[in-house]
Amino acid sequence: MPFVDSNHARIHYAFEGATDTPVLVLSNSLGADFSMWDPQIPEFVKFLRVLRYDTRGHGESSVTPGPYSIEQLANDVLALADYLKLDRFNFCGLSMGGMIGMWLAANAPQRLNKLVLASTAANIGTPEMWNARIDAVRREGLKNVAAAAIERWFTPAFRAKCPSAVRNVHKVLESANPEGYVACCAAVRDFDFRERLGKMRTPGLVISGTHDPATTPADGRFLAEHIAGARYVELNGAHLSNIEDAERFTQEVSGFLSP
């Protein structure tokens, strides 16, 4: 499996698709690994070179001492792009991955072509909420947190209709490294981009799930209204809209990224 070294960490990645097509980087949510993008890959690789990676602290990437910051996680993306000699790329991030995308658009705009911000917000939750979750994971592990997260990530209807898809995501979250998870919780807790959105100029698509209780449609509309020229789309799903409404998610992103 390919890895790249970045700031004392080994970042696990997969790079798929024809070498003469535009690059799309996919960034996972908190508690997931790059397998969360499996529903999109068959279509995306038809016209894109797709780079997926496990965020630091997740999947097969290193768990380095925390807490982490979104800046640190974004610099891992730049290190990966530099290693692969990618001057410019499209970026699609969901939840925590969307925060990484915002940081890149504000601090390394010369590296981005287009930006997709999915099921994310300029600021998620409160410090008290995140500190309580961090304490719970350190005290009890991820079992209870994972069970609660799955209820936020998918609607009851989808959980009943597609239990195998839900089980796969649940297994990844429940088996995540607790220290990597809490280190990334701190990164999300400390991120607040509400005052910086107006400075972003990368062409953007914002995607929200109608039934998402974590990053609500109101959060998505706030992003679209404050990022110059951004377009807003709402899908029939909860937090992991790329899985719950996979076909439309794929269509919307493909249309946005098409020349």
Image: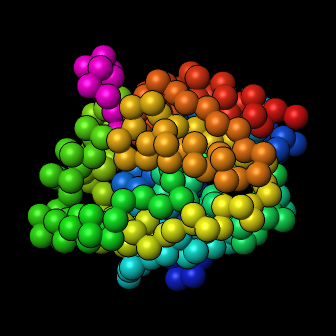
The number of callouts visible is 0
In this view, the residue farthest toward the left is 140
Q: Taking 233 as reference, is 85 above or below it?
A: below
Horizontal and vertical percent position of residue 47: 78, 32
- Which sits in the foreground, 178 or 222? 222
Q: Is residue 41 left or right of residue 119?
A: right
Q: Nearer the viewer, residue 46 or 77?
A: 77
Q: In the image, what residue occupies the spot 34% across and 33% down?
A: 154
- Please check the rendered image and state whether residue 161 is part of the magenta-colored stretch, yes or no: yes
Q: Is residue 77 visible?
A: no
Does the magenta stretch mainly form a helix, a strand or a loop?
A: helix
Q: Which quarter of the figure has residue 7?
A: bottom right
Question: Does the image show residue 109?
Answer: yes
Residue at 26% x, 53% y is 175
Farthest residue, direction top: 161
The quarter of the image holding the N terminus is bottom right
Left or right: residue 168 versus residue 88 is left
User: Residue at coordinates 65% horizontally, 45% vertically from top-left?
Assistant: 224
Q: Is residue 230 left or right of residue 135?
A: right
Residue 11 higher or lower than 30, as above or below: below
- Is 237 magenta? The answer is no
- Tell me which colouring the rendered structure shows: rainbow
Residue 183: x, y in percent? 37, 73
Against 141, residue 23 (above or below) is above
Point out residue 164 in the picture as x, y percentages from the top left corner: 30, 26
Is residue 50 toward the left or the right of residue 60 in the image?
A: right
Instruction: Name the quadrant of the C terminus.
Output: top right
The boundaries of the magenta stretch are 153-164
Q: x and y percent of residue 218 in the render?
A: 49, 43
Image point (47%, 61%), residue name: 123
